[in-house]
Amino acid sequence: MIDDTNADRLSDVIRFATGANTGNAFGNTDDNFLFRGFSAQVVTDGIASNALNPTLRQRDSVNLERVEVLRGPASALYGQGAPGGVINLVRKRPFDTAAARFNTSVSSLIRLRQEADINLPLSKAGEINARFVGAVECSDSFTLREFTGALPENRVVLAPSLSFSPTPRTDVVIRAEYVRDASFFDRGIPIAEDGSFLTDIDLTFADTSVGATIMQSILANAEVTHSLSDAVSLRMVGGVDYKDFEGTQSESSFLSPIDVPASITALFGFSDPIVADNSILRTLISRSFENVNINLQVDANLSFSTGPLDHQALISEEYAHANENDVLFSSDFLTDIDVTSITTPNLPGPLSENDLALVSDNETTTEAIGLIAFDKVSWGDRLHVLLGGRPVPLGSLRHRRRLIEGRGGVE
């Protein structure tokens, strides 16, 4: 289905999943999926890539072999508090046949995307194989192309991998993935209660003069699978996930067309009520986010019989260590934007970093240990019972937070 729909993003794939919806995408810079009203956790090759902040990036589909979706409370066995569901991304891996695939996409919105998928056997017997998957995308937006100096969105994906078999019963796969994404922060345009647009869809309320937000991520891991016998196999996966998100963006918060009480506007620092019929709140935000996540998972798969019952058991132990630094600067709210203007809205003068003040400075470190146990019991070909459990993860949390209240610099 990924090939048939020519999906470029994970969000393009999940929209075809039953009961799935897209949540707050953080100005079109994030992946956030909802199943049955609950947030879904996204894992890669069965391992949560980030225990603290699982997304803050739009995942590309060029390196995906398939996408697995598990809905409902059973997903809590795999995720860390994800009752809505778990989305497992199974990435491409090398194989023992030479193959190459190239794809180019061009659209009327000045969009150019080129993809490459090359697989090379490095030994005659097929014990060593290499694969390289990559994509480069440059695109404009119909909401930004009218602005002089607006930068196009740029995305680069590089994903090399290597597999080899040191013994007939042992397979090793080493993967790396680098993603760089530059885009403008844009929350869209407001709509009326009847669903009609309050302004022209070609408009943007973002201040493109402040530049783009840059996201970079590096994911590297190694997977070792060893079969002790036909009934017992072991799998160990360890990896590091590094993510950096930095940039200054103009955020627009739309208000419903009602008179906002003074008690509410006071929360935003205004002394008088705001008549929100033709205005929105806009603020300049600068954010620096860095996250490093280390994961280790060991699985044991067992197949055995007890009388007429056949068992397929899984015992999995996982360890996660994550460290996150998040620094946020913000300006005061600006309200003189007319959302009903047919032409370019009357934006306030350009903002600069001199208008910013430190709002928060957070550092969080977590360590967690989890255990999963499954047993699929089969009686013949028609009766199957699945038993499973996950104890409450053991771990620790260390959090340092410095909050600057107002402009007085209270620490």
Image: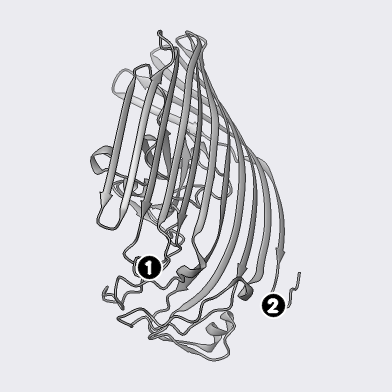
Q: Residue, x 46% and y 73% (percent of image)?
A: 253
Residue most toward the right?
A: 411
Q: Residue, x 53% and y 44% (percent of image)?
A: 217
Instruction: Using residue 245 as the reference point, say whether residue 152 is left or right of it.
Output: left
Q: Is residue 345 above or below residue 65?
A: below
Q: Name the residue under label 2.
A: 407
Q: Residue, x 46% and y 37% (percent of image)?
A: 158
**Which secondary structure, mark 2?**
loop
Q: Is residue 149 above or below residue 269?
A: above
| Residue closest to the eye, 265 or 389 | 265
Color scheme of the displayed model: one colour
Q: Residue 188 carries which label?
A: 1
Task: Pick the quarter of the image with the C terminus.
Answer: bottom right
| Residue closest to the eye, 365 or 95 | 95
**Which secondary structure, mark 1?**
loop
Image position, residue 332 (x, y; %) = 58, 78
Image position, residue 71 (x, y; %) = 38, 44
Local crowd at mark 2 within 10 Å, few (<14), some, or many (≥20)? few
Q: Of callouts 1 and 2, which one flags the residue occurring earlier in the amino acid sequence?
A: 1
Quarter residue 29 falls in: bottom left
Instruction: Using residue 71 as the reference point, say whether residue 44 is left or right of it.
Output: right
Quarter residue 266 falls in: bottom right
Image position, residue 272 (x, y; %) = 54, 91
Q: Residue, x 47% and y 8% (percent of image)?
A: 168
Task: Pick the quarter of the image with the N terminus.
Answer: top left
Label pair 1/2, CB-CB below 8 angstroms: no
Three-letter code for the amino acid on which mark 2 is drawn: Arg
